[in-house]
Image: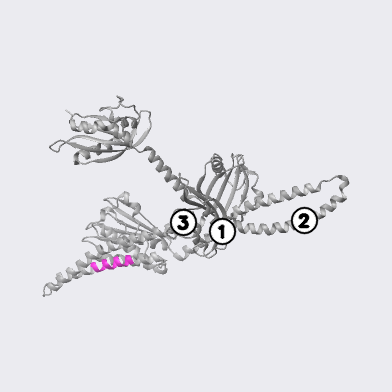
Amino acid sequence: MEDPVIKNGIVEDMDTIGEMVHVGSWFWDLRTNTGSWSDECYRICGLSPGDAQLNSETVLSYIHPEDREGAIDAVRFAIRNNRPCHHKVRLLRPDGSVWDIVGKLALAHDASGEPIALFGTVHDITRSKALHELVFMRNRALEVAGNGIIIADAQQPDMPIVYCNNAFTQMTGYKKNEILGKNCRFLQNDDRDQDAVVRMARAIQKGEACRVVLRNYRKDGSMFWNELSITPLYDEDEKLTHFIGVQSDVTEIQLTKSLLEDYTIKLEDKVAERTKEIESTVQRLVEVNLSLEDQIQETRLAERKAQESQAQFTAIAKNFPKGLIVVFNRQFELVYMEGEEMKRLDFQKCDFEGMPLEDIPVFSKDQIQRLKKDVAKTIEGRSLTFEMQFQGEWYAVNSTPLKSDGEAIVWALFVYNNITEQKKVREELAKALKVEQELNELKSRFISMASHEFRTPLSAILSSAILIGKQNEPGKEERRAKHVSRIRAHVKQLVVILNDFLSLSKLEEGKVQAKPQEFELVQFCKIVVDEMEATKKIGQTVQLKHTEVEIPVFLDQKLLGHILVNLLSNALKYSDEGEEIVLELQRIGQELRFNVVDKGIGIPGQEQQHLFERFFRAGNVTNIQGTGLGLHIVKQYTCLMGGKVSFTSQLGKGSTFTVELPLNLYEHEKNIADRG
């Protein structure tokens, strides 16, 4: 049974409420799971009042499929939390149209406080949303307009500026917070004695439109000529509310106009002089009935039209420095070209104007096809904005359609601005940022790794030193010797780590250079093998294999020693106790080949490509001490001596590292220079 209070107090007045506020209302009985709707609800759903299509079974089908889940969650939330709520959804009407609405609901309770019914409103916001989007679009258009635009409040004292777009701030150099709230006279500084200012003040006082050209001043004090158009705005009661000012920087045009005026005066003097001569000739040639006066007038008119046309095109071109202005007609012919960029590109107008696109030799086939598509789109009425590269330079391109006197689009205007310098600055900033990020990452990894790698040997040294102190009695010499040996091994490990850091630092700074000298290689390798004694595990051996008794070489002894020590140390470190490590030495013509062979843990295949990167360590050696710098330094030292390093490895079976170096570094570098 429906609650009579709820039914009489809410449902019966639904239609009256809807008519008063243009909002539909509805009611839903949670006990019977049935609902009812006002006439306005039916109309919002696109139905006639009382239409059977809207009922308890179909009500959800009128909510847009993408919004149904959210609407159901909103109702559940209201019931679960016993509180009103509102939710925006889209309605899908029978004619296929989609309407935006805001739904609000509240709960009715019985005497015990339990919810027994839902009731609410449905407000159609479709038109208001469209109006909001239209207003946003128009405001956005004002912001991106090329002209400076301001709006002044005519109802406030001194008519302060209440709006300005970005073009106005760029034109004047002032920020918006420095402009808003001021009268626009601040742009004239102390230069108020201008006829244009007087005319503008008179028009404002009368509430009339006017157009003037006056001197204004930027924030930095520089003067510019401002072409200002003022338009009054009246409300529905014909009351003046605002003035709109549209401004353009016409400094270049004014300068050009001044030059043209001087030229016109001189030209008129010359024409007057020539006219007298022609009149004298007319008197002498009157017998042949020549109408030279008419020809003079036509010539003067043609000259003036040509001057005006040339002045317009020159002014347009000068407004786009480091760029080009190009005009195409509907037949894809280039009909006009001007701009400073022509000098840099070494273009001549006569080589381009009047030429079809297909016949312009500076364009490739792909460029011609792309340009034809852009011209076609512009002729169709679209304005384009994009970037392109031409002859190694980057250009920002803007196109716009041009109409004839008959309002038909007959030309496509393309403006090319050279932005190569801006591109380079952006790229340099990006590179600097990347280097900074890499440096920060390098510092972080260095600190993390160094703190870990130094801690273990230092702890071992400390504990061994303490044990030596406790075992100072006679008869414990063997134990003391064992701890001393342990200290030496860890000190050597620390020296290796520090050498790796110092080597990496010098390599990064470009301070490491190969300094070759003559020495005997076989004996040198024997010394290196002997030095590995302290690094060996129990039962490990290092076998040196060579086919010649002596091999004289001319290499950097220090760099080569670091390479061999690092490779042998790795082979011993990653091999088990009792394993044999082999160092093979071969001379092949004028080349040397070193092979370091072990039967250790090997390197995972998917990680082998990163092995020579700094700080890289394979996943199967994370529990074994190491800096991840050794092989990176080996590769750099090998390259410094004109060689190369490579390896083969199988997981669990061992690895072979191969270093190939020239026998004589001096002869090697000389051969490279001769070939170059």
For label 2, the residue is: 272
Which kind of residue does numbered mark 2 sit on?
Answer: Ala
Mark number displayed over residue 159: 3
In terms of depth relative to the viewer, which is nearer, 612 or 646? 612
Q: Is residue 327 left or right of residue 570?
A: right
Mark earlier in primary sequence (1, 2): 1
Q: Callout 1 environment at 10 Å: few (<14), some (14 to 19), or many (20+)?
A: few
Residue type at the position of mark 3: Met
What separation in Å lies between label 3 and label 1 (alpha carbons)? 16 Å
Chief SS of the magenta region: helix
Magenta-drawn segment: 489-501
Q: Is residue 569 visible?
A: yes
Q: Which mark is residue 198?
A: 1
Q: Say what secondary structure mark 1 lies in.
A: helix
* Residue occupying the far top of the picture: 52
Q: How many marks?
A: 3
Please report the residue visible at 36 percent of the width from the left and 59 percent of the height from the top.
438
* Horizontal side of residue 341 vs 278, given as left or right: left
> Horizontal and vertical percent for residue 88?
31, 39
Residue at the image position 29 percent from the left and 40 percent from the top = 87
Alpha carbon of mark 3 to alpha carbon of mark 2: how far? 51 Å
Q: Position of residue 76 (x, y in %)?
A: 22, 37
Could you tell me residue 189's position as x and y percent?
51, 64
Colour setting = one colour
Q: Determine which quarter of the picture holds residue 181.
A: bottom left
